[in-house]
Image (cartoon, rainbow, N blue to C red):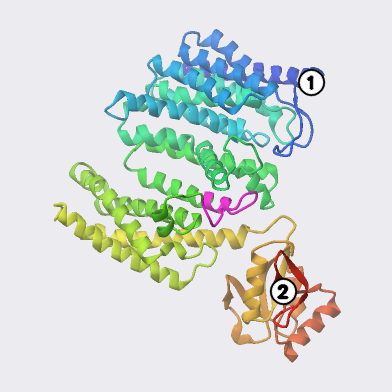
Amino acid sequence: MYTLLRPAWIILSAVLVSSGLTWLLIRGSVRLRLVAHPRADRWHAKATPNTGGLAILIASAGCYLCFASGQYRIVAICAGFVALLGFLDDRIQLRPLVKFAGQSIAAVVVIASGVMLHITPWSWADALVTFLWIAGITNAFNLIDNMDGLCAGVAAIICGSRFILALQNHDNGGAILLGILAGSVLGFLAFNRTPARIFMGDCGSMFVGFSLGALAIASPMPGTRVFVSTLFYPALTFLYPIFDTVLVSVLRRSVGRPISLGGRDHSSHRLVSLGLTERKAVWLLWLLSASGAATGLLTYAMPIGVLAIAALLVTGVSVFGIFLATLPAYAIPDTAPIRVPWIRRLTPNLRAGVTLVVDTLLSGVALLAAFMVRWENTFTGLILQQFLFSLPVVMVFYATASIAFRTFHSGWRWFSPRDLLTLGRCAVASSVTSVFALWVLGIWDYSRGVILLYTFLVIAVTAGLRLSMLFFWHSLMRPVGARRAAVLGANGATALTVLVLQSGGPMNATPVAVIDPDPAAARLRIHGVTVHYAGDDACRLLRKLRADLLVVPHGEQLTYEHRRILQQCREAGVPIEQLEMGMRVWNGDALTGVADSHAIA
């Protein structure tokens, strides 16, 4: 009981000190003009104090001196230095290179004190990986501090998961430090929830990120387990900060924007663009962070047994990231800044490249699952070595088969049975070529059960990727305020209308159904939109579908039944609009104002 009471008292003390300091800073920062003013690349709409990081820093430092003085002293000093660097940036806007230089100095000092990952045979490689980890996590927390309560909540979740593991491994010093940091963040979070009365600023986000990143390495826990746990446990614990950083970095570079340039293009902003409230978006991302932390704990406890779950979680998050990348502010462009000609020939655009990479990773997940299903509790020793040896071979041959069969052309938004057949051919071809390559390399007793399971699973997971994207597009891809449109008729003009409406734009309408007077057309799907039989009362059907308007495709050949439906809707007051499209003569620099004889509109 004493073991639990002391950490509980320390956490409560940190909460009370931090919340009291935060309350004082809210009252004093406005008078001292220590506020963040609204900007085009920031989310808040009014001037708000951004000194919450000071409350977190002072509360953490005070509790550290009272309860944990001397524990991980170099880490504590360097974290304080990074916090002061962040406070200076909040006041005078330091250049990104200057901030990174300060973070690098602190990281190097921590590494020089002996805090280092040990995952390679070379000390210089371990030092490099450690530096990248600390600097990366520090900047990741700086990036996710973009919406009320998001960064503080994620930090509290990560502190909690690592606090539990520290107690289980009798790392009392690390548990106390994590408890202090968790309490300080929770005290601040009480005032940072939507609508936030104060922000933590770079002072708080950099301090929290640096502290958690360094403590994840300084603790003796990672070094007490196998390599898989050493590598995956911290990565899963920090799943959301890593996810958002990778998403933002890739997309900003793909459109030629500097990574350090702020903007409303984070995962939280993209979720809000779907129509979620800020509170719901933050709760969803907290849930994602908690899922990663919980999976990390399981992976640490059972490294091999939970590895498949961890891999599936990472795959699911990758699919989620691909979906978010298609939302405002930056869609994944069709062209990418790739200068290597042979890469551009193999993967003609960025979408194709992302799909190829994710499919290849999924093939590795499928092989792991096949081994674990086939060998169950005996997945050790020679079987594990066989898996590790064959994993890169299988992934390389699957990537080669994907390029040969052009599986990346199967659309995320319009997945069809023909695409499933292509994925099946790719899986079979990759399995056959992989077995032959392994036979050439000397593995003659490869399990046929593993090969059959792998072939089935790789089809399932790659098709599941596309079906997931299809679900996201048709269930969630609805702009804020967009009207629900029903399209009249099921023919070629309707297919074009559905495509145009699905692409968004100034129409402010998204297709939810196609209605047709022919009962034989019912249950067909046009680009994922279901065709419904209009029946005798089309207006009743529209009310059932919750449609806001009826769209008439241009070029539609209106029959008597079509006109009857339009008359019913007109009498019932249902809005009716027609999509107009046309082609105009190109006149050098501008379009002529008159359509030629080939125009549709």
Earlier-in-chain disc, 2 versus 1 = 1
Which label was assigned to residue 153?
A: none
Measured along the vertical axis of the image, is residue 399 above or below residue 83?
A: below
Type of amino acid at the residue the image marks with label 2: Arg
Type of amino acid at the residue the image marks with label 1: Arg
Measured along the vertical axis of the image, is residue 362 above or below residue 21?
A: below
Taking the spot 70% from the left edge, 46% from the top edge, the residue there is 277
Closer to the eye: label 2 or 1: 2
Q: Secondary structure at mark 2?
A: strand
Locate the C terminus and report the quarter of the image it occupies.
bottom right
Asked if one can make out residue 4 in the rendered structure from this viewpoint, the answer is: no
Question: Residue reaching furthest front?
Answer: 588
Q: Would residue 363 be found to the left or right of residue 517 on screen? A: left
Is residue 333 located in the magenta-colored stretch of the structure?
yes
Query: Percent x, y for residue 367?
Result: 31, 53
State which region is magenta.
321-336
Residues 223 and 298: in front is 223
Taking the spot 56% from the left edge, 8% from the top edge, the residue there is 66
